[in-house]
Image (tube, rainbow, N blue to C red):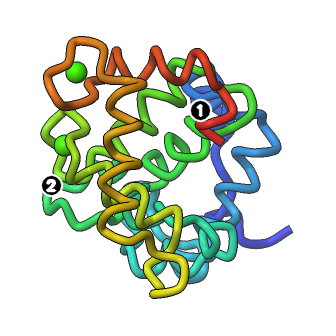
């Protein structure tokens, strides 16, 4: 068995198992995928993979929030959406089947908060809806449909009526319809 440099050290592996909701097999698979993105698997754990490369993963192709996923999970000081291996594990962990609803909704909220100001306002909701419907002309909502939909969403979720959805309001909605996070 060659290529020991691409193997994940045993102590790191058990540490990652403790810190994430992932199984040993899932972590090893993640490591294999990440090493391939790094190009050969000889890179140190700290080296990051660019957002452009992460977005080539077939698993993300169909995800309308893939850009936001990179942005939210990236710990890069440059805010460039690049992921370290640990960022990548955090991403997989948050959306794994074993993650708690609270964790999932916390990250879903951050992904939907496009301008990162800690609250979902009409602008964020419009972007969210556009991500879900796709932005082609035949699927996109008309301005009037969009206005109506956003007003319905706020009606349902904006409990304190300040015109935006904060994290606890969001989590309240999610607790009533947990399927939403998927
Ligand atoms: Ca916002
Ligand atoms: Ca509110």
Can you tell me which quadrant of the image ligand 1 is in?
A: top left
Q: Position of residue 175 (x, y in %)?
A: 57, 16
Q: Is residue 110 above or below residue 148?
A: above
Q: Is residue 100 left or right of residue 2?
A: left
Q: Is residue 95 left or right of residue 120?
A: right
Measuring 27% from the left and 44% from the top, which residue is drawn there? Answer: 113
Q: Which residue is mark 1?
A: 16
Q: Is residue 14 above or below residue 39?
A: above
Measuring 17% from the left and 30% from the top, which residue is drawn there? Answer: 163
Q: Quadrant of residue 57?
A: bottom right
Q: Is residue 113 above or below residue 156?
A: below
Q: Is residue 74 above or below residue 67?
A: above
Density class for disc 2 (Cα within 10 Å; few <14, some 14-19, many ≥20) is few
User: Between residues 63 and 157, which one lies in front from this camera angle?
Assistant: 157
The residues bearing labels 1 and 2 have C-alpha atoms spaced at a distance of 23 Å
**Circle 2 — which element?**
loop
Q: Position of residue 101 (x, y in %)?
A: 60, 21
Q: Position of residue 130 (x, y in %)?
A: 41, 66
User: Between residues 2 and 83, which one lies in front from this camera angle?
Assistant: 83
**Circle 1 — which element?**
helix
Name the disc covering residue 129, or none. none
Q: Which residue is mark 2?
A: 77
């Amino acid at each position: 068995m060659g290529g020991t440099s691409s193997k994940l050290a045993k102590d790191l592996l058990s540490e990652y198992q403790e810190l994430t909701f992932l199984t040993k097999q899932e972590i090893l698979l993640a490591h294999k995928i990440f090493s391939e993105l790094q190009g050969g698997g000889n890179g140190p754990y700290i080296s990051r993979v660019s957002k452009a490369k992460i977005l080539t993963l077939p698993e993300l192709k169909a995800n309308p929030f893939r850009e936001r996923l990179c942005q939210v999970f990236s710990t890069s000081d440059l805010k460039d959406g690049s992921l370290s291996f640990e960022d990548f594990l955090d991403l997989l962990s948050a959306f794994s089947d074993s993650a708690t609803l609270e964790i999932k909704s916390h990250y879903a909220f951050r992904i939907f908060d496009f301008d990162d100001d800690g609250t979902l306002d009409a602008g964020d909701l419009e972007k969210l809806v556009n991500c879900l419907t796709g932005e082609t002309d035949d699927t996109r909502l008309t301005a009037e449909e969009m206005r109506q939909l956003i007003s319905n969403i706020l009606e349902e979720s904006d409990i304190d009526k300040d015109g935006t959805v904060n994290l606890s309001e969001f989590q309240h909605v999610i607790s009533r319809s947990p399927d939403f996070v998927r």
